[in-house]
Image (cartoon, grey):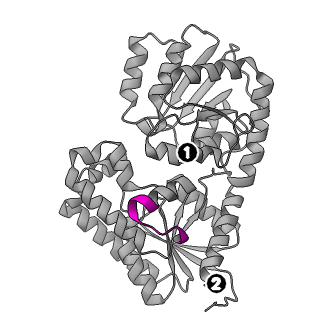
Amino acid sequence: MTRTIDRPLRICWFGTWRREYSRNRILIAGARQAGLEVLECHAPLWGDVEDRVRLARGGWRNPFFGFRLIQAWTRLIAGIRKTGPWDLLVLGYPGIFDVPLAHHIARRHRHPYVLDAFMSPWLIAVERGLTQRAPLTGKLLHAMEQMALRKPNRILQDTSEYAAWTRREFGVPPERVRLVPTGADTTLFLPRSPRPSADNTFRIVYVGTFIPNHGVETMIRTAALLRDRSDIRFRFVGDGPDRPNAERFARQNGLLNVRFDPPVPSDRVPDCLAEADLALGAFGTTPQSLMTIQNKIYEALAMGLPVVTGDSPAIRSVFEHGRHLWLCPRANPDSLADAIRHLHRHPLLRQKLAEEGLTRFREVGTIEAIGSTLRRHVEELLAQ
């Protein structure tokens, strides 16, 4: 039966999602831009990166994690009682641990609920080698995620490739999945006037996490192939498990064309990109890398920068090679080096990529575009 609601649709963004994570910030901002009233019912559960890695290795079996989860749920139960009436629960990312509680609350109120299954915690653990060191934890995490994905009325994901993988791995029916792109926070990432380098060098920047998913090894080996080009320089900003190997490779090969900087807060990432002539995306060959369009790609496009990134069906489902950005084979330093040389020689091509890429981004990746997509999915669900 179709329900008629004579007031703004009211969404309760519910759970232990990570407040600082860009996916959550963008979706909440987009929902509000689209005229949805968003009530936040949040309780902290997750700590820093090391804390999450510890839990993925099996630390969540520790009674202390159980205590943390119960404490968070207690806060959520108290919080949901104070929010007033709502039409829909949305579980922000990551939310698989919140599904049992949300399922109970939604059924009690006779309202639907949605899980943003942006990335698979189990697949992340597999790709980082955590399940190899703790096989039982991997099996339990897989079972927990499978159970969590089968309960909500809708599942949100960012690409059709990821949705297809979720269907194969966890048996989620495709009719319960809806796509919402990653996009970029357009309150931070906006076009800026180009800043020419003081020494007239061609500046290439990577901002992100040093993990296999992003293929930093490919990027640093590309820098080695271009070591004799004093007019081309690389800057790597960020941290992660692969950074020590990248720094060691640079030292052992005397790469004077490479600079490593520590991670910066999200509001300073635009400053890093503004000092670049070309932005690097992702070049990993892990399933996750191939199935997603990383936010660093959207962010660079949002600033009007030309982008070179690894090829994949997910990328091509939204962007066109040679028009919106430049694609090259993944895990292939020679191809990436050729792409950089080509883009360096052709400034008009870089300008075209920057302009067309920005135009395409504004069609699919802004807060407004994402909010419009999300509202459409919400209205469809509530109309059933």
Position of 226 compared to 80: left or right?
right
Disc on the earlier residue, 1 or 2: 1
Position of 354 compared to 122: left or right?
right
Q: Quadrant of the C terminus?
A: bottom right
Give the crowd class for mark 2: few <14, some 14-19, many >=20 residues within 10 Å.
Answer: few
| Residue corresponding to mark 1 | 294
Residue drawn at (68%, 13%) of the image: 199
Q: Position of residue 378 (x, y in %)?
A: 62, 74
SS of the residue under disc 1: loop
Q: Residue furthest top?
A: 228
Residue 183, compared with residue 324, is above or below; it is: below
Image quadrant where residue 334 sits: top right
Q: Residue furthest front?
A: 168
Q: Position of residue 22 (x, y in %)?
A: 54, 53
Residue drawn at (41%, 56%) of the image: 120
| Residue corresponding to mark 2 | 383
Q: Position of residue 198 (x, y in %)?
A: 69, 16
Q: Position of residue 301 (x, y in %)?
A: 68, 41
**Which residues, given as a range, are shown in magenta?**
167-175
Q: Quadrant of the N terminus?
A: bottom right
- For the question of whether residue 155 can be seen, the reply is yes
Image quadrant where residue 342 sits: top right
